[in-house]
Amino acid sequence: MKRIGSYLALAVLAGCAQHAPQEAAYTPADCLGSTALPAAVAGQFDAIEDPVLLRQALGKPEQGKLCQGQVYRSKADTRVEIFRAWNSTNPSSQYGQWWAFNKPSGPVAQYRADYEICYQWSPLDKLASCTLKAGSRVVVGTGQSAQCSEYLTYPVSETQQIFIVDAADAVADCSISDGMLSWNP
């Protein structure tokens, strides 16, 4: 009787395993764009190996973060300006982990799509413009898809993003700008 019960339990578990949701396959081939630095800043960084930092920056499909990435260290004479749109209702978000080489411009909806920023995460009403400090380790990559709700999912993006673990220590000389309502026909 024990043996039949054991076989029955194994059969039930095997059946459940066959019907369990399967995790979506992730391969860098699913990503768009490149992890190569833009020409304007390429000479100010060295590519380095840091698998732990890279893992922190990479995300699973529909969960945001990066789809692919390369770790870089800024050189001693670095003068790279980076930008972060953030949430004024959460002052600690000024030094969050996600930055860009380019100053945001154009429609907010397009910026959200390019950088996979769900509306729940930030109203994007402040902008920090800072200089990256020498010796800072960053991950540069392209965006992973992000599911914001059952009605809104951003696909992977070829737009490059910068991931910084402790931005408060990695940037200096910041200036802050306020978002302003502007309606164009």
Image (tube, rainbow, N blue to C red):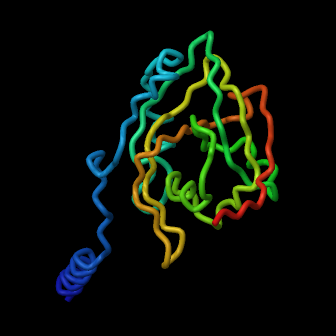
Left or right of 11? Residue 135 is right
Which x, y percent locates residue 148? 54, 69
The residue that appears at 60% across and 52% down in the rendered structure is 106
Left or right of 18? Residue 86 is right
Which x, y percent locates residue 9? 25, 82
Q: Quadrant of residue 155?
A: bottom left
Q: Residue furthest front?
A: 185
- Which residue occupies the foreground of this view, 109 or 142? 109
- Which residue occupies the foreground of this view, 104 or 171? 104
In this rendering, the answer to whether 108 lies above or below 35 is below
The residue that appears at 65% across and 61% down in the rendered structure is 121
The residue that appears at 49% across and 72% down in the rendered structure is 152
Quadrant occupied by the C terminus? bottom right
In this rendering, the answer to whether 132 lies above or below 147 is above
Q: Residue furthest top?
A: 77
The residue that appears at 30% across and 75% down in the rendered structure is 20
Quadrant occupied by the N terminus? bottom left
Which x, y percent locates residue 93? 74, 49
Left or right of 78? Residue 156 is left
Q: Quadrant of residue 182?
A: bottom right
